[in-house]
Image: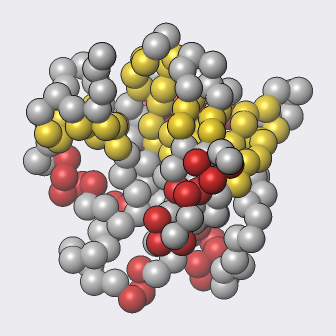
Amino acid sequence: MAWGFRILEGNHDAADLARGSYPKHPGTHIRAIRSRWRDWADRGATWTWCGIRFGALGGAFSVDAASRVAGVNWWPGETTSDEDVALLAEQGGLDVMVTHDAPYGVTVPLRRSLPPELAGPSDDNRIKVANGLKACRPKLLVHGHLHVAYAGLFDHGDGTRTRIEGLSSNLEGNLGARGILELPSLAFTRPDRVR
């Protein structure tokens, strides 16, 4: 049985710098990190596991960028670009989309309000994620970034919807930062829901 870890980058990761250190597997946007058991699904990467088609769209806006140091703990290429969205969209339909940020148009419970100077850039990134979601129309999207564990729906406006699973972070000290995705059923279970 093969196992491993596939990651995608968030907003506090030096993705542009890392791309120079981790070359892509030929013909993919998957980058090897450590031997054969750990790799990185760069923005726009797609792959198939157990007959289920996955796609990745990393990146997000750091609302705390003003308190960080460029090139030390903040990097300007942190947000999702239109080119990232176009690359993912040209790969075709997906069953599961894995993103760092939440798509715009999904209500995230308990999400704190941001001042306008932060809300605009944050929403811009979320709109790009929503554009990728609309283009690829997966059955399920799993994301992190907002540190809130929740389940929701994205309405495509034509009677179809995508199930959204938001993950919290380990900083909150709960189990909502993890989930188990069963393949090929796409059943998603959080350890905090298992009793």
Q: Is residue 162 above or below residue 52?
A: below
Q: Residue at x 23, y 37 (%)?
A: 38
Left or right of 81, for residue 183: right
How many marks overall? 0
Q: In x, y percent, where is residue 49? A: 43, 18
Query: Extreme front residue here?
Result: 195
Q: In x, y percent, where is residue 104? A: 69, 54
Q: In x, y percent, where is residue 73? A: 27, 75
Q: Is residue 182 above or below residue 173?
A: above
Q: Residue at x 54, y 44 (%)?
A: 179
Query: Extreme right residue here?
Result: 159
Please name the colour scheme applied to the rendered image: secondary structure
Residue nearest the observer in this picture, 65 or 4: 4
Q: Residue at x 72, y 37 (%)?
A: 163
The reply to whether residue 102 is in sight is no
Q: Residue at x 61, y 46 (%)?
A: 190
Task: State which quadrant residue 174 falls in.
Answer: bottom right
Task: State which quadrant residue 139 falls in.
Answer: top right
The reply to whether residue 73 is in sight is yes
Q: Quadrant location of the N terminus?
A: top left
Query: Extreme bottom residue here?
Result: 67
Residue nearest the observer in this picture, 185 or 76: 185
Q: In x, y percent, where is residue 102? A: 61, 53
Left or right of 158, for residue 141: left
Q: Is residue 104 above or below residue 184?
A: below
